[in-house]
Image (cartoon, helix red, strand yellow):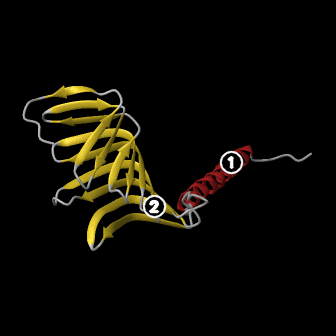
Amino acid sequence: MMKYHNPKKLKIFLLSLAVITTGIILSIFVGHRIFAKKEKTIPDIDNKAQISLNKIHQTATRDGQREWSLDATKVNYITEQKLANFQDLFVTFYLKDNSEVYLTADQGILETDSKDLEVRGNVVVTHGEYKLNTEVLHYNNNDHMILSKAPVKITGDSLFLIADSMSLNLKTNTTLLRGKIEGTLVDKIKF
């Protein structure tokens, strides 16, 4: 059995050893945390998408005339199905009378062959003083029509309408409401 002749030195040695060990453990822990924060993460991309882009702009024309333009924060393009899935989109429809109809939605799916578009989530269509709110809308590019089978709410300075479904013909600038229709109309309405 060994005897220590200087217990004070032994206490200092053991205390120093404990402080050094704690320091090493803390530096390894802190170093690992800093390194983990600097690692680049791979964004979650739809497995089916062959192309993914951020901040895009697309314009559709027919016979040299703009029909609509689309802006979105993100798009995933699936070549096999010829679909483009947009996030946070803003669409401008150009009418023959040189007015514009604006559409915003959380997401949209564009069929790239037909240029038909379906939008979902917080859908808002604005034309002049009128605003339409719904959850799902379809745009038929061939007929230049906006359609909704979901309930719609249309508001403006002189009207408030709720309907089960609707269609808006962008060629003739006419709207057709279907199903149960409720609302308030004020004199001097111009459609």
Note whether 126 is above or below 185 in the view shown.
below
Which marked residue is nearer to the observer: mark 2 or mark 1?
2
Q: Quadrant of residue 50?
A: bottom right
Dot 2 falls on a residue whose secondary structure is: strand
Q: Which residue is mark 1?
A: 18
N-term mark: 2 or 1: 1
Note whether 180 is above or below 177 in the view shown.
above
- Answer left or right for 80 relative to 142: right
- Answer left or right for 39 relative to 21: left
Q: Position of residue 46 (x, y in %)?
A: 57, 58
At 32% from the left and 44% from the top, the residue drawn is 167
Q: Position of residue 14 (x, y in %)?
A: 71, 47
At 16% from the left and 47% from the top, the residue drawn is 128
Label 1: few (<14), some or many (≥20) within 10 Å? few
- Which residue reaches farthest bottom? 64
Screen quadrant of the N terminus: top right
Q: Which mark is residue 75?
A: 2
Q: CA distance from mark 2 to mark 1?
A: 56 Å
